[in-house]
């Protein structure tokens, strides 16, 4: 069964900004740069921050100033579909 994938373009964010991901099921949350999102979608080696979101909401901190993306998927998990909402916490 294929996993659904959603990629959210967060735009330029400053270091230490908190990104909040609200999910309706347990899912993988991956914070990445554009180059890593491209590698992730091509299924080749990439770097990311995050992991399996077992708590709601799932907060992740931006590690450095830059243009960031969040990818959400359920690869390796029981759910195949999900709803996700991503917001910047000020």
Image: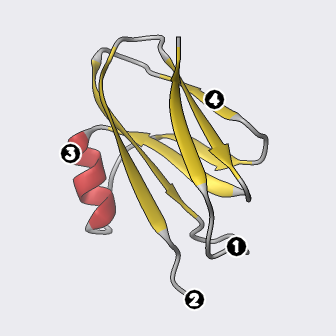
For label 1, count other residues whose C-alpha is less than 10 Å away and answer few (under 14), some (14-19) or many (20+): some
Residue plotted at (58% across, 51% down): 84
55 with respect to 61 (left or right)? right
Residue plotted at (23% across, 42% down): 34
Tell me if residue 63 comes above or below residue 86 in the rendering.
above
Label 2 secondary element: loop
Label 4 secondary element: strand
Q: Give the residue number, with chain letter if any, for mark 3.
A: 35
Residue plotted at (33% across, 51% down): 46
Would residue 44 be seen by someone viewing this image from the given angle? no
Q: Give the residue number, with chain letter if any, for mark 1.
A: 79
Q: Earlier in the sequence, mark 3 or mark 4?
A: 3
Q: CA distance from mark 2 to mark 3?
A: 27 Å
Q: Quadrant of the N terminus?
A: bottom right
Label 2 close to label 3 by CB (< 8 Å): no
Q: Give the residue number, with chain letter if any, for mark 4.
A: 59
Would residue 9 be seen by someone viewing this image from the given angle? yes
Residue in front for this viewpoint, 44 or 37:
37
Label 1 close to label 4 by CB (< 8 Å): no
Q: Earlier in the sequence, mark 3 or mark 1?
A: 3
The outermost residue toward the right is 55
Q: CA distance from mark 2 to mark 1?
A: 10 Å
Q: CA distance from mark 3 to mark 4?
A: 22 Å
Image mark for residue 9: none
Tell me if residue 44 comes above or below residue 49 in the rendering.
below
Label 3 close to label 1 by CB (< 8 Å): no
């Amino acid at each position: 069964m294929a996993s659904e994938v959603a990629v959210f373009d967060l735009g330029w964010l400053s270091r230490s900004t908190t990104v909040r991901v609200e999910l309706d099921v347990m899912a993988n949350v991956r914070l990445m740069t554009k180059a890593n999102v491209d590698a992730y979608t091509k299924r080749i080696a990439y770097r990311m921050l995050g992991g399996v979101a077992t708590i709601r909401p799932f907060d992740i901190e931006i590690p450095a100033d830059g243009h960031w993306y969040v990818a959400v998927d359920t690869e390796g998990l029981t759910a195949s579909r999900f709803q996700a909402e991503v917001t910047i916490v000020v």
